[in-house]
Image: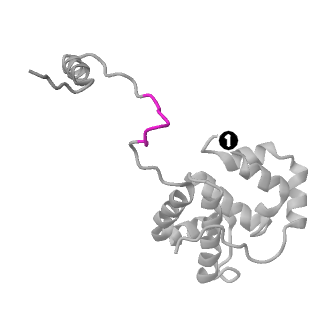
Amino acid sequence: AVRLRRKGFGAAKRNAARWINGAAPPRWRLNSSRPEPMLKLDQLEMQRTLRLNLVQSEPQIADIVRQSCDLDEAAWPQDQLLAHTRRGLDQAIGWNLTTQEDVIGFLVLRHQFGERFDEFPAVRKFLSRSDLPPDNRIQLMMLTLPLGIWDVVKRRTPKGQSTSMLNVG
């Protein structure tokens, strides 16, 4: 009689019995020939998701910016501040700023230095760095870049509205 046997079935059965009896399962090894088991979102899709999650909070974020920058209601009507905040949120998420402190810090800097302050080469280079920790990036930028840079940023930031870096629609 010919006996058919699945290759490797015995090992899988033995390993399963060991795991049930308390032994640790083997560590996963990445194998480039197999697709990864988890769904991975690309960076742009993750940014869009983060930005969409902030839509309901936009009025509260705008109020925080108003208080932080001491913005007068006559100079900054709510609709104008909200539009400015929305463009800033698009930019902040586009720079991979994800913590509340970093996002608010970025929005405050936009009011202090101009909406397009992140176009200044030293600022752009810092925000583009991938070796930074995910939190406190704005604080680290303020501490890392020399004070003289900020005077130049204030003088040379182009006037006008920023272009949205992120299309969430």
Q: Residue at x 77, y 64 (%)?
A: 112
Residue 32 lies in the magenta-colored region: yes
Which quarter of the picture shows residue 72?
A: bottom right
Amino acid type at image mark 1: Leu
The answer to whether 160 appears left or right of 135 in the picture is right
Secondary structure under the numbered disc 1 in the rendered image: loop
The percent position of residue 23, horizontal first and vertical second, equals 27, 16
The percent position of residue 154, horizontal first and vertical second, equals 86, 64
Give the number of marks. Answer: 1
The span shown in magenta is 29-36
Q: From the viewer's perspective, is residue 55 above or below residue 77?
A: above
**Which residue is identified by label 1?**
132
- Residues 64 and 113: in front is 113
The percent position of residue 79, horizontal first and vertical second, equals 59, 82
Q: Residue at x 72, y 46 (%)?
A: 129
- Residues 78 and 84: in front is 84
Q: How is the image coloured?
A: one colour
The furthest residue to the left: 1
- Decide whether the magenta segment is chiefly helix, strand or loop: loop
Within 10 Å of disc 1 (Cα), the crowding (few <14, some 14-19, many 20+) is few
The answer to whether 122 appears left or right of 62 in the picture is right
